[in-house]
Image: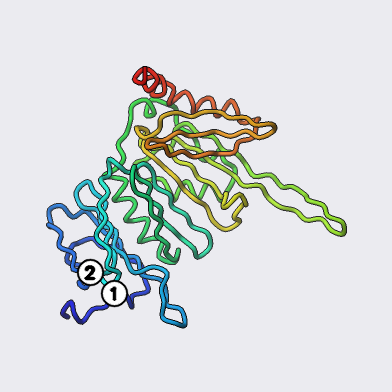
Amino acid sequence: MLPSDVDSRRYVIAYFIGSPQDLPPDFLIHTPPDDFQAALFLPGDQPDWLGRRRYPPRVLSLVGSELRIYTHPSAGQPCQQVPLEHLVYIESGCILLLGWLRFVACDFEQTFPYSTVYRHAVDRFLRRLRARWLAPEDRVQDLPSFDPAQLQDVKFGNALARELDADEVPRAGLFQAPSQLVRRGWFRRWRYRTPADLLVATPRRLLWLTDRDKGIAASYGTIARYAPHRNIKSLVWETAGQECALRIELLAGKHWRVPIKPEYREAARRLESLYAETSARAVEAGR
């Protein structure tokens, strides 16, 4: 089949690409075989009744130590190249059938939606990417192992097991369990669950797992955000009235803000101590 006979805009599945020969030919991607690591094809949005699509098909390609993002040529967008050393963190969300990947770099930020039916292919690509992007650090390897069985939460236990790579051992951790609350109105009352959060330091990264979606607990899914330790400047405990949070300062002015109940303050201190030395060096460098 010639490239002109292929139209990947008609593809509806996401799939892992292990060889440059398997790249969609109509993307016209020319990659030296020696530099190619892996790729992921993400189909475009299905057209509406006017034939319009919100986003075109894309190929995420790991070439050497660089993430390359190719958009279908019909969109007229150039290839975007993101060196892995400039990548600050990754977000990977799965809520019911809605999945997405979000890459945040020093001067780049983009989100790629997909159907969670094809999550296996996405996870396979992310494992390849993490193998190139993340490296173990001794200060975390020396900590005693964090036992995921302590979670006593099936949903987050499964989410952590699915997220960890084969050789990755969780170390320090903090799990903020959900609470069941009751809200009363004039004629009725209803129960709702607060979001849960799990912070885990492994030798390779700091991982934040949550079901906090736009401030509301997502019953059927979780969101993972993670960054290598070298990209984390400090962890800061914040209080404002009755509200507390752990602010995680990242490179390039990025940050995560994890709402934390006051009773988890001691567990948060253990995580803060991992980055205290990095924070002190940053202060000295700024003088």
Quarter assignment of residue 176:
top right
Q: Which residue is mark 1?
A: 8
For image coordinates 26% across by 63% down, the residue present is 17
Query: Could you tell me which residue is drawn at 77 percent across and 49 percent down?
Result: 182
Up/down of 157 relative to 262, above or below: below
The spot of residue 58 in percent (x, y) is 31, 65
Identified by mark 1, the residue type is Ser
**Along the line of sight, the residue nearer the viewer: 48 or 222:** 48
Residue 217, which numbered label? Answer: none
| Position of 110 relative to 59 (above/below) | above
Instruction: Residue at 41%, 56% (x, y): give it.
Output: 111
Per the model, the C-alpha gap separating discs 2 and 1 is: 8 Å
Crowd rating for badge 1 (residues with CA inside 10 Å; few <14, some 14–19, many 20+): some
Mark 2 closeness class: few <14, some 14–19, many ≥20 residues within 10 Å: some
Q: Position of residue 224 (x, y in %)?
A: 46, 48
Location of the N terminus by quadrant is: bottom left
Q: Closest to the observer: 146 or 243?
A: 243
- Left/right placement of residue 69 relative to residue 258 reads left
How many marks the image carries: the answer is 2
Q: Which residue does the image show at 34% across and 20% down from the upper left?
A: 285
Among the two numbered marks 2 and 1 on one chain, the one whose residue lies closer to the N terminus = 1
Locate the C terminus by quadrant. top left
Write down the quadrant of residue 13 in the picture: bottom left
Q: What is the secondary structure assignment of the residue under circle 1?
A: helix
Q: Nearer the viewer, residue 234 or 136?
A: 234
The x and y percentages for residue 57 are: 33, 68
Q: Are marks 2 and 1 in contact (CB under 8 Å)?
A: yes
Which residue is the site of mark 2?
27
Dot 2: what SS? helix
Question: Where does residue 178 sit, x and y in percent of width and height?
Answer: 64, 44
